[in-house]
Amino acid sequence: MLRIVCDAHAVAERFGFEPLSSLLFTAIRLDSNRFVTPLIVEGDGDDVLLVRQQEQGNVLSSGVDPARIRFYDPWVTIDQRIVEDTEAASSLPTLVKELSQGEPIELDPRAPYIHYLGISGEVDVKVPGATEDRPVIAYAIDQQRVLQQFAAWRKEAVSVATRIIGDVPTLGGLEDELTSDRDSRFEALGSLAAELNVDGIIASSPPNFSELTGTRAREGAMVLWSASDGRVVIIAGEDVTDAPGEPIGRYRSASEAIIDIAGVGRLAFEEQWESTELALDLVARGNTLVSASKSLGSWRDLRDDEDLAFQVIAARASVTAIEETVAWVHEQLDAGRSITELDAYSVYLRHVQEFRVRNGIPFAVEPYFTNLHSSSRMLFPGPPVDFPINGDTKCVQLDAGVKVSVDGVVLGTSDMARSILRSDNGREAYELLTKAVREGIIAHIRPGLVCEEVHARTLEYLKDVRPRMIEIGLLGPEVDFDAEYSKRNVGHLMGKQESFANELRPGYTHELTVGNYGAAEIPWRYGDHAIGTEDLWYIGKSKTFNLTLR
């Protein structure tokens, strides 16, 4: 019987790389990196690594033997030559069925519940149960204290953000939108519970844990919100000695605590994060689990304006650090010097911290994710490695974000991109795409527009751009561009992380409103260029602001 292991530490030990630092999307998905972390299949032969194809370039750059890798979820690209030599299964469940030849498999109880839901639809899944109860303690959280904590942070952030944008002409008037006295988190949570028809909400991913408690997430701890009385309770293992709140009970297991506090019923569950073991235990005790990872992501996204000051700090830190790094790389190449991707990354990190120091920011400003690579190395997105950037380099993409935080509580994030183009056709393409992002997307974003309509309008705008891209060799005439680009977004909302709940792409029907904050992008990977251009926008009361113009 095949056994599927879900353990980032085991990946590091057996395959020689750390997923959270070597892969891109595990870093981006703060509320669901367990969902996208590679899995190990143990069988009669060597272990096999199951990896989403979007990470192909990163896992191969880490030195993993291609013979020990199987990819799933085909990566979307307008240049099929990038992936034509690599097979990718249509989904993880399909790949597991193929590898097991339809026979039963054993799934790691730590695997996120979404893997169990998918794989069990294809083959019989056995999940080893716990041999003994793991006692927990429940701690009641004072919601008023949570609100006061965020209000204090926001008040300080408003002062900082106002100072930062004071001399930015394009952001004139934005200071009037900054606020510290509005907080709808618990009210909106009640509305979400009613919409999902649930009796409680369970969350332990870092963004959701922090949003509900005002503290950093802890391994071995989760938070429960009860619909019947609106209580917020942390449920933590006995070995978690720093859990905040007032102790209100000791239980033999997390499931027992959840049922005692919220009752037996329907529970909203982070299926992309919470373990299969916990899920099956709750189901066995009579509960119905409602998948809510995306719903909780949207709950955070749609309150962006309440945290606008943090988003502004993150956006201005990003544009400053990224554009200073781009200028530095050009200077090095113009002088005939050879550097590496890691050299450029070091300069980027220095500029992030210099921005914080120069502006007297009392919050941590640290990397959220960094996609920095030369197109000579790969066209896949990924973190920097020790690869040369020199006179032969045609393009370097720097697509990165920072997070603004206090004691591990993330209060705002950014996501934007610039590129270093050294070829004539690359420079022209970059100008066309930058104009497309600003004039073809952001200039038309306004209240009342639906996410998927933004995508459709972008494709319409690009119809006039594509002929020139073909002429300069950055698009093949055979590419069915609309079909391929309809598989990916042209942006997304932001907040405490990149949104996977509200994307600018077909099928996403959120109606944009005043207060929405997001990114607009048109990644263009074709031939020997990997061009990225992306800006952050905010829908204000009177207009839509581009937060990343300098």
Image (cartoon, helix red, strand yellow):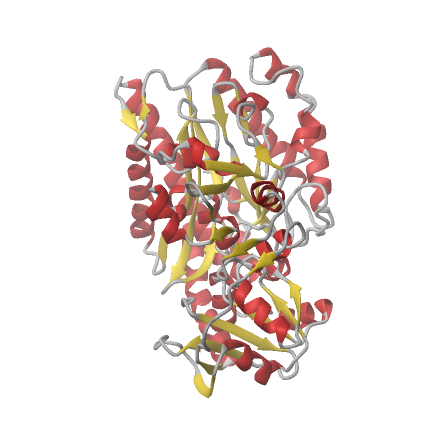
Q: Quadrant of the C terminus?
A: top left
Residue at horizontal 41%, vertical 51%? 164
**Closer-to-camera residue (388/546):** 388
Place of residue 134 in the rendered image (x, y in percent of width and height, measured from the top left): 44, 77
Residue at horizontal 48%, vertical 31%? 380
Residue at horizontal 52%, vertical 51%? 1
Is 77 drawn above or below residue 442 in the view shown? Answer: above
Q: Answer with left or right where residue 2 lies relative to residue 194.
A: left
Place of residue 133 in the rendered image (x, y in percent of width and height, measured from the top left): 46, 78
Is 470 drawn above or below residue 502 in the view shown? Answer: above
Place of residue 471 in the rendered image (x, y in percent of width and height, measured from the top left): 60, 11
Q: Answer with left or right where residue 3 lies relative to residue 97.
A: left
Place of residue 207 in the rendered image (x, y in percent of width and height, measured from the top left): 49, 61
Is residue 25 among what the camera can see?
Answer: yes
Q: On the image, which quarter does residue 125 sit in?
A: bottom right
Residue at horizontal 42%, vertical 37%? 59
Is 86 drawn above or below residue 246 in the view shown? Answer: above
Q: Outermost residue toward the bottom?
A: 248
**Closer-to-camera residue (450/64):** 64
Q: Outermost residue toward the top?
A: 471
Is 292 drawn above or below residue 101 in the view shown? Answer: below
Is residue 75 among what the camera can see?
Answer: no
Q: How many marks?
A: 0
